[in-house]
Image (tube, helix red, strand yellow):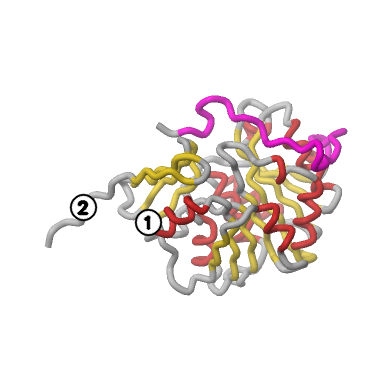
Amino acid sequence: MAEAPEPIPVTRPVDCGTARLLPDVDRPRAWLLTVDGAPQSYVDLDAPTHLEFEYVRRLAHVLDEVAAPGEPLDVLHLGGGALTLPRYLAATRPRSRQDVIEADRGLLALVAEHLPLPDACGIAVHPQDARSALEAAPTAGADVIVADVFGGSRVPAQLTSVEYAQAAARVLRPDGCYAANLADSAPFRFLRGQLANFATLFEHLALIAEPSVLRGRRFGNAVLLASRAELPIAALARRAAADAFPARVEHGAALRRLIADAAPVRDAEAVASPVPPDGAFSVG
């Protein structure tokens, strides 16, 4: 029997730039998705629970801990990419209902063609703007909202205001959890404003990031968590500390010190997240 041909990279213009699918030479059906050189997603079609990116693993820790193992969840994903987390949740929590919002129709077409979803996986993909979709979503309809929306390498301004946080609070159930992938560096003006936004609406907040990011030594990802119910801090801290790139879970007094005198950011003043330094998120 002839060997299957080696997978080759795929390059295609999409709505927000140039997307590339790059095969992983070490995993036969695994692909890295980049847009304009910035990594967006990594998917292994044969192993949906394999998560290559550190921040994605931290978001997955949240999905693992917000309910009993295997219990289905209703999840709204803002930002789709190659659908790494929806695939993960479909594998770890069968019968979950997931709605994925992704504005880039070209990107969705590329992913559907080359990285198709399994049949009957409970994942519905919607080509919509994230803020508009959130504002139109049913009240108290989601157990979890996962926000991972980047225009290039920046979170769009329309997703950084207290009005946006209010929309998320309306869509979550009383014990629901909001989890967002953000990026910043010292002095954390952007991150402090985001925490201040969600502190106006949620009693419980946490931040998961590598110690070097939290200490202000470098630019990097930080996962923001917000809930009206208590967060599983101890379990998340254990998982984050055991990662190949260990992270810390900040909460309580430490977060209040970080927020300090930061004020909530209204729509009229909202700005996109900071421009990453050269090379922060790019690949060769």
| Residue 234 shown left or right of residue 253 in the figure | left
Quadrant where the N terminus is found in the figure = bottom left
Q: What residue type is labelled 1?
A: His
The quarter holding residue 133 reads bottom right
- Residue 5's tag is 2
Q: Which residue is drawn at 55% across and 62% down?
A: 125
- Give the image location of residue 165, x and y in percent: 78, 51
Above or below — where is 266 with respect to 274? below
Query: 10 Å neighbourhood of mark 2: few (<14), some, or many (≥20)?
Result: few
Main SS class of the magenta portion in the image: loop
Q: Is residue 279 magenta?
A: yes
Seen at 54% across and 60% down, the residue is 86
Q: Which of the image's four quarters has the C terminus?
A: top left
Mark 1 vs mark 2: give the one in front: 1
Left or right: residue 53 compared with residue 97: left
Residue 201, percent from left and from top? 84, 52
Q: What separation in Å lies between label 1 and label 2 (alpha carbons)?
A: 15 Å
Q: Residue 219 location, x and y as percent?
A: 61, 30
The magenta-colored residue range is: 256-282
* Residue 271 higher or lower than 119, as above or below: above
Vertical order, 276 against 223 (above or below): above
What residue lies at 61% left-to-right and 57% top-to-bottom?
77
Residue under label 1: 114
- Does the residue at mark 1 contact the one at mark 2 (Cβ under 8 Å)? no
Label 1 element class:
helix
Q: Quadrant of residue 142?
A: bottom right
